[in-house]
Amino acid sequence: MQHLSSKLQRHDLANFQNLASELETQGKACVQLDSARYTEQIDNCLSEFDKRFQDFSLLEPVATFMCYPFREDAEVDSLASKIATLFHLNSSGVEDEILTLQADIELKSRAHGQFWNLLTEVKYPNMRKCATSLTALFGSTYLCESAFSHMKIIKSKYRSTMTDEHLEVCLRLAVSSYCPDYASLADSIQCK
């Protein structure tokens, strides 16, 4: 975004085809006045992104550590405080577990695949909670996106008068993986 803003300020319109065509159509003076407005809009967007995604700056070093916890350059105290803040854990306990984990030669030799499943709940409760919570962040995002996609399909312009209760039932059916056993259900019904 900052790159686009600086390009607009330099009047480099390579990434702004519509603005360039507007420049050709209406003349330079009119569009140059608008470029300041567009720059302001991009700056507003940039500040909104910074505000909305400020947690990612806290999450990034934690995710990097969780990908490979045996880095030599890991700042343990800073990392422990970020993990403790994100997942509501005791910072000193997290720091102890990180140091113990990094010193464990056996775990270091097996650091691939399902590595976090190798950690025992007794020895590394905070690290296991952090790993499962971090994994759940991405899974829950996927489930939310999937549910919204199903809802968009269900509540189309042809079904716009659907009640909330009916939408909820249809959405539950759409996202559920349950498949009823129709044969046993049919067998259980008594015919008259």
Image (cartoon, rainbow, N blue to C red):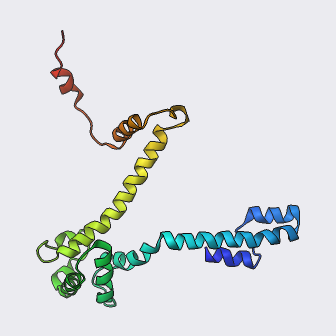
Q: Which of 78 and 121 is in front in this view?
A: 78
Q: Give the left or right position of residue 31, taking residue 111 as reference.
A: right
Residue 13 appears in the rendering: no
- The quadrant in which the C terminus is found is top left
Q: Give the left or right position of residue 166, taking residue 42 as reference.
A: left
| Residue 44 at x, y percent in the picture | 62, 71
- The quadrant in which the N terminus is found is bottom right
Please identify the quarter of the rendering in which residue 89 is found. bottom left
Identity of the residue drawn at 68% across and 79% down: 6
Please identify the quarter of the rendering in which residue 141 is found. bottom left
Identity of the residue drawn at 31% across and 68% down: 134
| Residue 161 at x, y percent in the picture | 50, 32
Q: Is residue 5 above or below residue 132?
A: below
Residue 178 appears in the rendering: yes
Identity of the residue drawn at 37% across and 53% down: 143
| Residue 113 at x, y percent in the picture | 26, 69
The residue at the far left in this view is 122
